[in-house]
Image (tube, rainbow, N blue to C red):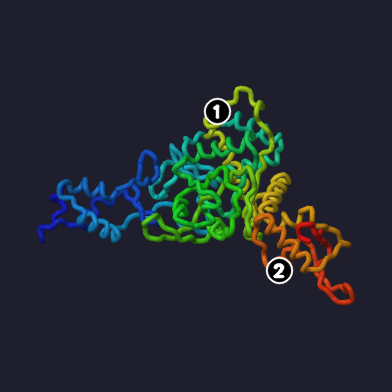
Amino acid sequence: MTAQFINPDTGKLSAVDVASWIAPDLGRAIDGTYHEYDTDAGIYRPREGLIKARVAAALGDRYSATVLGQVEAHLLNVTIPEVGPPVIPGEGYLDHIVLMNGVYYWKAHEFGGHDPRLGALNRLQFRYDATATCPVFRDWLRVTFEDNAQVIRHVWEVLGYLLMTGNPEQIAFLFYGEGGNGKGTLMRVLENMIGADNMAALTLHQIAEGKFELATLYGKMINLAGDVSSRYIENPEVFKTITGDDYVTTSHKFGAPFKFKSYAVPVFSVNNYFRTSDSSEGWRRRWLALDFNVPLRGKFAGFNEQDLYAEAPGIFNEAMIALRRLMERTTRPRFDPPAAVQEATRKMLDEADPFMMWFNSDGVLHDVEQSDVRDTVYQHYVKWSRRNGYQAMSSGPFGGRLKQVGVTSAGRRIGGKMSRVYTGIGVMIEPHDA
């Protein structure tokens, strides 16, 4: 085989010809890695040492590290299809989902064969079956969410959203509850359907700290992380970037930097709410929380979680109906959370916000007749923050937050001189602050 790579004019090995020979069915991702198309799976797969293995197979005992380097350089000049999630135009989602036996075009509700031109890296872990149903899973939802039809409708829309590629709503989901309430079961159903190769598992803190781990989000459909720590999150700007259809620059360890847009929708499971310094609208609008507050032990006679996994094709069919319903809405945001989800989200955001924790604490009085000197109120907040391990914001942003919750500022004569006071709020001086 080596003879075909010898340049007849020079009698030397042609790295250009080797590069052209190994290129068919290769794909190149924007992180610089090479993938090969798996005809049976219908997706491009990465393989460690892929180029090295192909060059070695082509050259046999003529292989050398020097030739490998030359071939890798020439590959950059060979037309190789780009694979992986592109920068998706428009609203930022793909209209197709690859499954084990073909491709489902969810907007059109059509099913076809695998297609290498899609450049797909992700494939769900089950076969499409248009006739499949999911009676066990439907019953599990009914019991887990106490027959609340609106919450169950919302859960179906969340499932459909997580099974497509893209995050046009710029959203993250939080599953909250103590053990034995179903949130772990739903996380495992998602993992079983999507597959470990198509998932990242970064905690919220790992995302916020923005190190090499961010590279693992590239090419993933979902970021599924359980048991997220309640540790304080100092700066969640990177989290807002990866959920905001913005570029993030990262690198694989010891690799060259690359930039990409993450379409891995974050899903976190917690037993206790985390805390953050960010109270911006950009932070608050990104979250939808779902409470799992029904103890399920003893509710399902003979329950076997494997029965839920077996219903993946039926769950998919129901989820696609819900996805079309969701994405056909003309309002923004498209998600229309029921009252229980709105309340769970409000509670999560308030618990995550030290200012709101202070505002709702026993030492703060709320009444239209209440007023207190601005510096007194601010110092009460500062001391509360220190006692509870939080960094207090400066007085300017503090006043802005009070204004957001309906507290106003006015001038008032106190002890014969004018003072600036907050109206609608008062504070009690506690013994350790006196």
Q: Which mark is residue 395?
A: 2
Where does the image place residue 70, in percent across and percent down from the top left?
23, 58
Residue at image point 71% right, 46% down: 338
Going by the numbered disc 1, the residue's amino acid type is: Asp
Q: Nearer the viewer, residue 409 or 107?
A: 409
Q: Is 180 left, or right, of 362 in this rendering?
A: left
Where does the image place residue 16, in percent across and percent down from the top left?
21, 58
Residue 420, by quadrant, is: bottom right
Q: Is 45 left, or right, of 189 in this rendering?
A: left
Residue at image point 83% right, 62% down: 424
Residue 372 visible in the picture: yes
Q: Is residue 91 above or below residue 1?
A: below
Real-space Cα distance between discs 1 and 2? 56 Å
Residue at image point 58% right, 31% down: 134
Is label 1 in a helix, a strand or a loop? helix
Where does the image place residue 426, in percent across and percent down from the top left?
82, 61
Q: Is residue 315 above or below residue 25?
A: above
Rendered-image quadrant of the C terminus = bottom right
**Residue under pointer 1:** 307
